[in-house]
Amino acid sequence: MVRFKNRYFTVEVVPENSNDPFKPKEYDIYNAVLGVTEQIHGEFGAASVKNGLDVKYFNEYTHIAVIRSRHGPHKLLGSSLPFLSRIGKRGVKLKNIYVGATMVKCFKHLQKYNQEKLNQAIKLCKTEQEKKALVEKFSKQTKD
């Protein structure tokens, strides 16, 4: 038996127009990632990435996704992700947060990332009520 190594890309999907609700399906993200890889690296890149490509996690509230790829072709995927500009019909930008070897490490890093985001948002709050409401809303979103 041969052990297949994977790499997990933790990315934040930032919609260009934040006024409209943005709730893409994991399949839409999969198709967009595969399409942009084919645009950048051609059929060879798309074929090598397609074998192990999967969107393992997507949070609708925080717009954070974890994308799995096989070790080796993950370099092709990582080089094409910055060029992703559309998911479905919506314009987006991808912000790479972390690349890890296991999902556990990705989620540990994601906890630190979310805590930093929360601390930044708390600094902008002026009253204790705003802080409590923000913490409650944030904890509710990250549990999903």
Image (cartoon, rainbow, N blue to C red):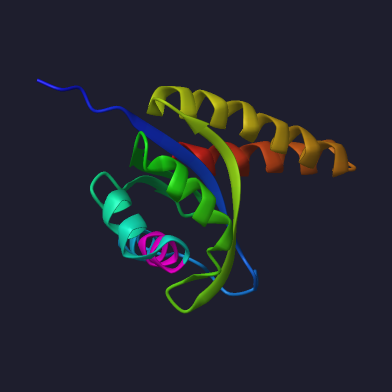
Residue in front for this viewpoint, 139 or 70: 70
**Res. 15 image quadrant:** bottom right
In this view of the protein, can residue 61 be seen by the observer? no
The answer to whether residue 106 is above or below residue 38 is above
Instruction: Work out which residue is located at the far bottom of the displayed protein and give it.
Output: 89
Q: Residue at x 66, y 30 (%)?
A: 115
Q: Position of residue 126 (x, y in %)?
A: 90, 43
The answer to whether residue 5 is above or below residue 38 is above
Residue in front for this viewpoint, 96 or 139: 96
Queried whether the magenta region covers residue 48, the answer comes back as no
Instruction: Work out which residue is located at the far right of the displayed protein and give it.
Output: 126
Which quadrant, please, contains the C terminus?
A: top left
Prevailing secondary structure class for the magenta stretch in the rendered image = helix
Q: Position of residue 75 (x, y in %)?
A: 46, 42
**Res. 19 image quadrant:** bottom right
Q: Position of residue 3 (x, y in %)?
A: 20, 22
Q: Residue at x 39, y 33 (%)?
A: 7
Q: Residue at x 71, y 38 (%)?
A: 117
Q: Is residue 138 left or right of residue 124?
A: left
The magenta segment is 32-39
Q: Is residue 135 left or right of residue 43?
A: right
Instruction: Work out which residue is located at the far left of the displayed protein and give it.
Output: 1
